[in-house]
Each structure stands twice: as C-alpha cells, then as structure tokens.
Image (spheres, rainbow, N blue to C red):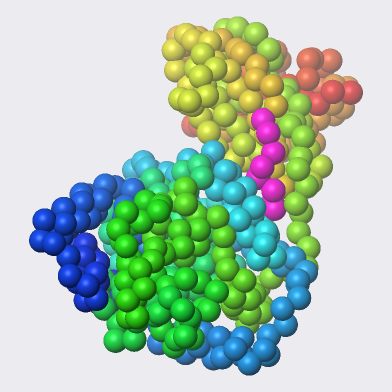
Amino acid sequence: MQRKCIKAILLKKLNHALIYSQISFMFEPMPKIIFIFLYVSCLSLLTQAQNLGCFTQLSAKQIENLRNFQQKLSLGQVELGKKSTQFVPIKIHIIGNSKGIGYYSISNLMTALCEINERFLPVGFHFYLAQTVNYINDDALNLGDLNAIYDRALYYKMAGAVNVFFHDGGNQWCGVYIGGIDVVFIKNSCQATLATTFAHELGHFFGLPHTFYGWEGGQTPSNIEKIDGSNCRTAGDGFCDTKADYVSQRWNCPLFWNLIDPNGVVFKPDSSLYMNYASDNCHSRFSQEQILTMQNDMLQRGIAKTSASTALLAAPNKVFPAPSDSGIISTNIPFTWRSVPGAFAYQLQVARFGDWNYVNHNQLYSDTFAQVNLFGNWPYAWRVKAISSGNTCSSFGSADTFFTREIPAGLAPISLLAEPKVFPNPVKSGQTLYLQNLKAGKVNIYDAKGVLKWGQSFEGNLSFEVPYWPAGIYIIKWELPNHSYFQRLLLSEN
C-alpha cells in the first residue's frame, strides 16, 4: 500500500455516506425526504469513534496473486480437506508517546491473543508469542503517522513473524495492514474485549481483501457484483461464497437500508464475515474460500511451525509479599513468586484495595521477580498468572493483601544494579554466598521491609554462610567510597 493511497482515502472519507445513498438511486427512484434522512444518518455514524475504519489496500501484485488463486478454486485445483494446525509466530509491539504514556493494556493484550486463537481455529492457525513484548516510546508512531511507520517500523519488526503494533493516538483508522512493510497497526481503543479489528487486520495480512472490494474511499467499481453470483469471480472480493457487499463504512447489523444490485435485486450484505465493515458484535467467521486463501498465503510465507507450547498453566505460588504483611516500604517493593514449568511469561497485577478495575501495576515478566513502586500508606492486593507462549487464556491465582508505608527517613530508595556479582542466586540457608568484584567498603543485607539482617566491612571479594532466615527477597547493599551498589538476593526454601 502506498502512502498516497491512504492519504487519498482519508480525504474521501466524508463522502462515503453520499456514495451509498447514490447506490440505491442508480437502480430505483427514492423520495427526496428519505434521501436526506439516510444521508444525515450515515454522517452521524461516521462521527462515532468506534466507526473508524481499516484503510488497507492490497497492492496490484497481491490482487494478481489473489485472482490467480481464486481461478484455481474455480478449476477445483485446491485441496479442500482439513489441514493440520499451523503454529504462527507473532511479535507484539506496544507504542507509547515519548514519555511512555499510552501503552496498550497487558490485560487487553492477553484477552486479544486468547480471542484471536479462538477465531482462527477454523482456519487452522494458532498464534504464539515469538518474543517478549517490545515497548516503543515514539510520539509519531503513537499517532500512526505514515511517514514514521515507513521510516521506523522496519527497524522494530521481527523477521519471520507476524508483526503487530498497538498505538494510542491518531484518528485515521482503527487498523491498517501496510503491505509494503508487511506490518499491522491497531489503535488501542479499537481492540478491547470481543472487538474484531485484530481478526480483520490479520485477514488482510494473509491476503484477504474487504468484502466490499472496489468500493473503498467512496469509489464505485465499473463491474458491480451481482447477488446471484454470476460474476462473483470477476467483481467484488472475487470469492463466490461471500455475499455481494457495497458498504465501505461502519454499519450495524442488519443494515438499516437496502442495497440493490445491477439486476434490481434488493438485498442486505452478510454481516457475519470478519472482512466487512459491520459492527464487531456482528462478526463470527471467515468463509471457506477465505480460509483456503489464508492457508495458501501461509504456505507461501513459510513462517509457521508444526508445534508450539499451548498449555493452559496453573497460577504460580506467591512468595513475597506474604498475606496480610504490613509495614512494607512503598518504594521498590520486590514481588516474587515460584516458577511454573513451561511458563513463557508471568502477568503481575497490583491494585489498591484490590479493585481490579483500576490496577496500579499490570505488566508481563519473564522472570519470577518484579520491583514495583507504589505510594502512601494503603492496603494493596496482588496476583499473578503464568502464560505459555501459545496460550494467554490462563487465570490469575488468588489475591493476597499487604499494607504499605512511606519510606523512613535515612533509608535511601533501593535501586537494583547488576554489579558487583553475587552467586549462587537463588541461595538456600546454610549455603555459602560469594560476593565478587568488590573494592574496600561495607556490605549490608536488608529484608524486604528494610530491616538490617547482617553487615560486614570488606576488602576485596567476600564469602559467608547464609543464616537460616525466612525464604523470600533480600536486598544486598554495598557501600563503596564513591558509590553504592544494590542487588536482590532470593533466599529459597530448603
């Protein structure tokens, strides 16, 4: 898709409603009063944020490949049997502005990935996270600026995967597939629970046009698809199992006005197909020919695997903070939990008063540890869930409540740095702990509440036997002449 094509579409957007009204005038008279009502109604729909569209246009080469494959469908040269599941790597990029504001919610992402695998089950595709989520702070990308996308998306994209970028700003589109770069961009507000923008754009990624192909941007094609299917291969989207569709604006189902084909047949488009512009709640499927087309595109891409980790994992056991723990310093709280075999990542949520509608912290971690800044003297609740790379549908474990307090005077906030080195880590009580790369200074070990547990002066490397302290997170602080270093220490159960 060329930049100028998208810009031209944006300029024509407000003409959509008039074009659709003219469709009916092409084939039968309409009273003037009805025309005015219809035109105003359509414009009012266009003013709603949820009616932002998808401005994907397949390139001439993509359309040529599509038509060649559709000809094979007509000639019966395509195998119609069920194919084995293809496991598809997906790379997620979450964009915020230059200050890191506006990130797509991790909870929404987990739900979106869960839903997309359910929707692509009939296709035989199962998406799995190829890498951890990539966070990008970029004002222009966050606004969906096309110049920025063309300039920088290639830098961020992962080769051999489906690259999807979620962004917060801009009002150009809900979603777009940009074929020249082979990436998908989705506006955050357009992919909440049960939304179908994600499915729609992935359909484009795998070679599907809109069901109303030819009508985009307020255009009227010279060859209009007939409802009897007599020109289904040469008009519209070229699929004979998708009903004729002339509506390239968002619409509620069923369509509140009638369409009339060149033979004078009155009809309404099929609202169930993901590739039309019906409201999200109307969508439920891809057609069989659309499915075969996507399977063929996947075959040409060669990015799928024959297996992936799709286990539905149990929630991990939490270690710290302990249930009802009180007096935890609100700055740099170390949260830790037990590892779960097969886990790709863990989602940690922290909410004041345990109100999960307004979480204070909500992130994915590849480790079993997170350091979180909270505030004030409040009760908080926290919970964790484990996900495998191909299954984000797992549930959170039970929530535990703890209580924070402000940092006491004289104890500096703890920041964790990688130096000096400490091993083994995790360690068990009774084992020898080794501290290396140290100059002369003093080392102190604090528990998670900031209570000093042990201290000693040193010159050079140091080792000592770990006392029998309770399992959990401890903070090692090395005080050197010109700087202090911090490192977390996980004391596991014996």
The percent coordinates of residue 101 (x first, y second) are 36, 41
Dominant SS in magenta = loop
- At a point 67% along the width and 89% down the height, the residue shown is 76
Depth check, front residue: 370 or 231: 231
Question: Along the line of sight, which residue is nearer the eye, 21 or 239?
Answer: 21
Quarter of the figure with the C terminus: top right
The structure residue drawn at horizontal position 45% and vertical position 86%, both measured from the top left corner, is 231
The span picked out in magenta is 389-396
In this picture, is 350 found above or below 70? above
Q: Quadrant of the N terminus?
A: bottom left
Q: Is residue 282 left or right of residue 444?
A: left
Estimate the x, y position of residue 32 in percent, counting from the top left: 10, 61
Q: Is residue 145 magenta?
A: no
The answer to which quarter of the image holds residue 436 is top right
Expressed as whole percent of the image width and height from the top left, the position of residue 103 reads: 42, 44
Q: Nearer the viewer, residue 454 or 28?
A: 28
| Residue 391 visible from this viewpoint | yes
Direction from residue 118 to residue 429 in the image, left or right: right
Q: Quadrant of residue 339?
A: top right
Seen in the picture, residue 18 relative to 467 is either above or below; the reply is below
Q: As drawn, is 340 to the left or to the right of 278? A: right
Work out which residue is located at the far left of the displayed protein and give it. Answer: 32
Residue 153 visible within the image = no
